[in-house]
Amino acid sequence: MQVLGIDIGGSGVKAAPVDTAKGEFITERIKVETPRPALPDSIAKVIQGLVQDFSWTGPIGITFPGVVVNGVTLTAANLDPAWIGLDTRALFDSTTGLSTSLVNDADAAGLAEMRFGAGAGHQGTVMLITLGTGIGSALFRAGILVPNTEFGHIEIRGRDAEERASERAKERHDLSWAKWAERVDEYLGRLEAMTAPDLFIIGGGISRKADKFLPLLTSLRATVVPAALHNDAGIVGAALGAGLGTSAT
């Protein structure tokens, strides 16, 4: 099955047609900056433009950085509050004139990693964490997704975890790899106490630099590995969400 995967992020919107049987891009991806303010109509126009760029007429899978239930977006931590309570899937259907599905961005990345990446074949409890503009989470048990966990917003030292341990927090506070790894270690330790995963998969673009910080994570019982699909997992997972009809869409 071929599906156009679109990954909406806090800083960029990325898209590529995906072969969902192989988890591979059919053509090179396209990335455009996320408009500011990130209003629904503005994002919808970006998606419409990407559909036109690929001359796409088939199914579309789209990720969203927030809780998604039956196509309605219930949170929007790094976008505009206008998204909250919006039937976003209906908006994208109307804008593109095509059938779309919608899934939480970290859940999408998790779907891709569990099918084609670092979690493939793992039947225990797996937690994927994306470290980027914010922190996303996806929880799997026996290969089954528990959607919309949003563990990036648990409180650590009186603040949202993503304000301390995201890649953006590292850049904003000019943290060394060692200092940032301490924060990530503390955050993952809290998640381990809550969910007892056997495996953590660390995703997002920073996973390409896993050798800089994963060896510095010392307090965890669980195995910690970088994502295999790196920052492309969201696009692949968006396409899988459309093809599989996940409960989050």
Image: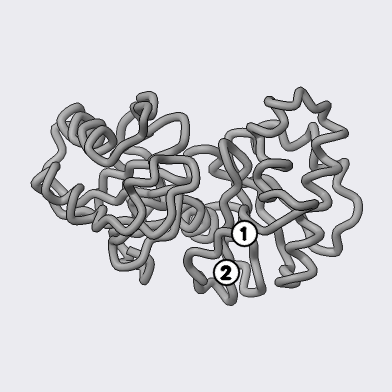
x and y, in percent, of residue 127 in the image: 64, 62
Which numbered tag is attached to residue 151? 1
Point 81% across, 44% down: residue: 183
Point 71% across, 72% down: residue: 195
Front-most of 152 and 219?
152
Q: In this view, does 44 lie to the left or right of 18?
A: left
Front-most of 43 and 144?
43
> Which residue is label 2 attached to?
140
- How far apart are the two marked residues, 1 and 2, measured between alpha carbons? 13 Å
Q: Is residue 65 left or right of residue 82?
A: right
Outermost residue on the right side: it is 218
Query: Circle 2 — which element?
Result: strand
Q: In this view, does 72 lie to the left or right of 229?
A: left
Q: What residue type is labelled 1?
A: Phe
Number of numbered labels in the structure image: 2
Q: Is residue 186 above or below residue 163?
A: below
Dot 1 crowding, Cα within 10 Å, few <14, some 14–19, many 20+: some
Q: Which amino acid does label 2 sit on?
A: Phe
